[in-house]
């Protein structure tokens, strides 16, 4: 392309600027069927709003898909759908045409593969307590052995505003993504709304729940909570003493849980009780009226 012109300055000249296609490149190094792939085209002197036509081609299929658009500033950035019919080991490239300018060219070639298919996805348990180690498993088809993968764990939200908890890099082995994750809850459980508080807004109590997705080559599997929801279970310690520190043993009690349910129990000889597997959040402990009257008279 000629971009240098030498002319006299004391007279008018008409110079014809030739249009040119400078390059056409994929913005990704790998194309996955069923997803979009980014691309870029750079031109010279094609004019604002020029029509551009891009056709993706493959080894076995010829023309795969096509898009028509316009180009501005001599640069085109776009995305194009890679159809799911791609075969393993396929290579793809795209052809660029600017018919009005008489320009035509081809991009670089990149490898492609069909969409990843999810066979099974699950937690090793349905409930988790602090310190529990959970195994996360996703069985997949259409993935290469040793492929880089990322497991992302989310806290589930009924309104679909899921909070990301952690991203864990891993690899595909034996058509599986599998890893261990230690559960911890670092927030203040008092901040979890109770059923009574949520009733004001027409909602009901929901404990912290979690799901995970797997990301490989830009494809995300598990967005529909196919892993199932992992539920956080907590515990409550009760200790009843007089003001002088003397335990009050064998007292009957009732706990009102954050979800509105109730559990009853009895303190041991040391005035202590531990209740496992309770819904996390704010709770209320009630003792009998008889104990309250006695404790008041005893100055506890």
Image (cartoon, grey):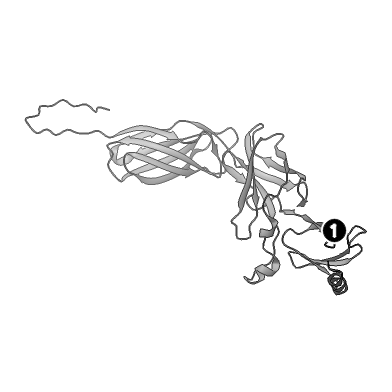
Query: Which image quarter: residue 180?
Result: top right
Q: In which quarter of the image is the N terminus?
A: top left
Quadrant of the image containing the C terminus? bottom right
Q: Residue at x 85, y 63 (%)?
A: 242
Residue at coordinates 87% horizontally, 58% vertically from top-left?
A: 272
Q: In this view, does 145 lie to the left or right of 20?
A: right
Quadrant in which residue 237 is drawn: bottom right
Please state the horizontal and vertical placement of residue 92, each as a whole percent of the image: 50, 34
Q: Is residue 178 above or below residue 154?
A: above
Nearer to us in this view, 235 or 160: 235
On the image, the x and y values in percent for residue 33 come to 56, 41
| Horizontal relation, residue 174 to residue 252: left or right | left
Number of disc labels: 1
**Residue toward you, 254 or 49:** 254
Q: Mark 1 points at which residue?
A: 245
Badge 1: residue crowd in 10 Å (few <14, some 14–19, many ≥20): few
């Amino acid at each position: 392309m000629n971009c240098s012109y030498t002319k006299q300055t004391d007279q008018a000249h008409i110079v014809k600027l030739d249009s040119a296609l400078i390059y056409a490149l994929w913005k990704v190094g790998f194309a996955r069927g069923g997803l979009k792939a980014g691309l870029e085209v750079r031109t010279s002197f094609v004019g604002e709003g020029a029509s551009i036509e891009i056709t993706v081609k493959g080894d076995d299929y010829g023309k795969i898909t096509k898009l028509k658009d316009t180009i501005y500033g001599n640069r085109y950035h776009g995305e194009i759908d890679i159809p799911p019919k791609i075969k393993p080991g396929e290579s793809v490239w795209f052809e660029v045409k600017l018919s009005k300018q008489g320009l035509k060219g081809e991009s670089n070639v990149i490898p492609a593969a069909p969409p990843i298919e999810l066979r099974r996805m699950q937690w090793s348990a349905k409930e988790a307590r602090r310190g529990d180690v959970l195994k996360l498993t996703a069985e997949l088809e259409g993935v290469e052995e040793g492929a880089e993968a990322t497991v992302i764990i989310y806290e589930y939200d009924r309104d679909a505003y899921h909070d990301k908890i952690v991203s864990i890099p891993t690899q595909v082995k034996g058509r599986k993504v599998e890893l261990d994750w230690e559960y911890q809850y670092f927030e203040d459980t008092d901040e979890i709304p109770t059923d009574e508080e949520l009733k004001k807004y027409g909602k009901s109590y929901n404990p912290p729940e979690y799901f995970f997705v797997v990301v490989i080559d830009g494809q995300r599997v598990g967005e529909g909570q196919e892993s199932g929801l992992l539920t956080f279970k907590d515990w409550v310690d009760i200790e009843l003493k007089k003001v002088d520190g003397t335990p009050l043993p064998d007292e009957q009690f009732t706990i009102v849980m954050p979800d509105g349910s109730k559990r009853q129990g009895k303190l041991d000889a040391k005035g202590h009780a531990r209740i496992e597997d309770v819904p996390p959040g704010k709770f209320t402990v009630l003792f009998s009226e008889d104990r309250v009257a006695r404790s008041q008279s005893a100055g506890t």
